[in-house]
Amino acid sequence: MKIDLHTHSYYSDGVLSPTELVQRAVLNNVDILALTDHDTLMGIDEAILAAESHPIRIIPGIEVSCLWREQTIHMIGLNIDPNYEPLREKLEGVLRDRQHRAEQIAKKLIKFGIPGVEEGLARQVKGVPGRLHFARYLASKGYSSTPGKAFKQYMARGKPGYLKSEWMSLAEATRLIRDAGGLPIIAHPRRYDLTLKKTTTMLEEFKAEGGEGIEVATTNQNKSDQIMMSRLANQLDLAMSIGSDFHEPCAYNELGKASFLIPMEGKFIADRL
Ligand code: AMP
Ligand code: MN
Ligand code: MN
Ligand code: MN
């Protein structure tokens, strides 16, 4: 079974439509695909529709931006009810906040001497605006050679396009996903600016709030990261998840290609879907 439980469409900062995403997943022989756009459910109906004539199962999902002690954490919610009204209402507010943040970031970059930012963003954004849209625009105009480099040079903390964000708390995100019938999972646990000790504390609190899993297999986690995170999962009685965090066709990330790099013992989120 090929499983990918963390992917993006152009309704957040991916580049494919949900239909194109599903088609690509089918070509890659993915059996179970979760669409988990940042802070939005906009693509889910389309993904389910696109999968109707294919041998693939779509899991309605989301990647919620939240805060734990000043640190931004990304929380995957799987098998959420996309019609759960309190979640939809909350996400409307997050969309407005993100739109406001994007306007402020555009102003900062314009002030920094970069023209055309607002138009560059408007051309790309179909749903939720994010920093990667700015990075892609900057790269397209030659300010950096790749969006990844533009992100580091302009959009990372302390850089000219950075703005502190006020996301909901980790506790609130966990509760919201649970209340929507979903499984809360901490995305890419090795990507945060947290020591292993702080990561453990964060995961303990997450578990106490009703957290269910952590991503062990994801594109940027190597074998030793996976070993470390699987140990932590077992220690805290959390299930292990797998997801590529696919945003766009590129050399280093592909739909369905995240995998456990060693045989894993323990609980798997995929068994609970
Ligand atoms: P935002 O939610 O708007 O703050 O943007 C966060 C998103 O930016 C993440 O979901 C990634 O897709 C992207 N991102 C974060 N760090 C990098 C990086 N170093 N290079 C490219 N994209 C990044
Ligand atoms: Mn992203
Ligand atoms: Mn993320
Ligand atoms: Mn993601």
Image (cartoon, grey):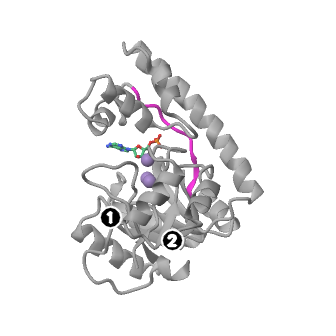
Rate crowding at label 2 as few (under 14), some (14 to 19) or many (20 or more) other CA atoms within 10 Å.
many
Q: Residue at x 24, y 65 (%)?
A: 222
Q: What's the magenta bit mostly, secondary-structure-wise?
A: loop
Residue 115 quadrant: top left
User: Can residue 37 be seen?
Assistant: no
Tell whether position 162 is magenta: yes
Q: Which is nearer the N-term, disc 2 or disc 1?
A: 2
Q: Amino acid at mark 2?
A: Ile
Circle 2 SS class = loop
The quarter of the picture where the C terminus appears is: bottom right
Residue under label 1? 196
189 left or right of 48 in image: left
Q: Residue 215: x percent and y percent?
A: 41, 67
Q: Is mark 2 within 8 Å of ligand 4?
A: no
Circle 1 SS class = helix
Figure check: 141 above or below 236: above
Q: Amino acid at mark 1?
A: Leu
Q: Residue 108: x percent and y percent?
A: 45, 20
Q: Give the camera-side residue of 225 and 148.
A: 148
Residue under label 2? 56
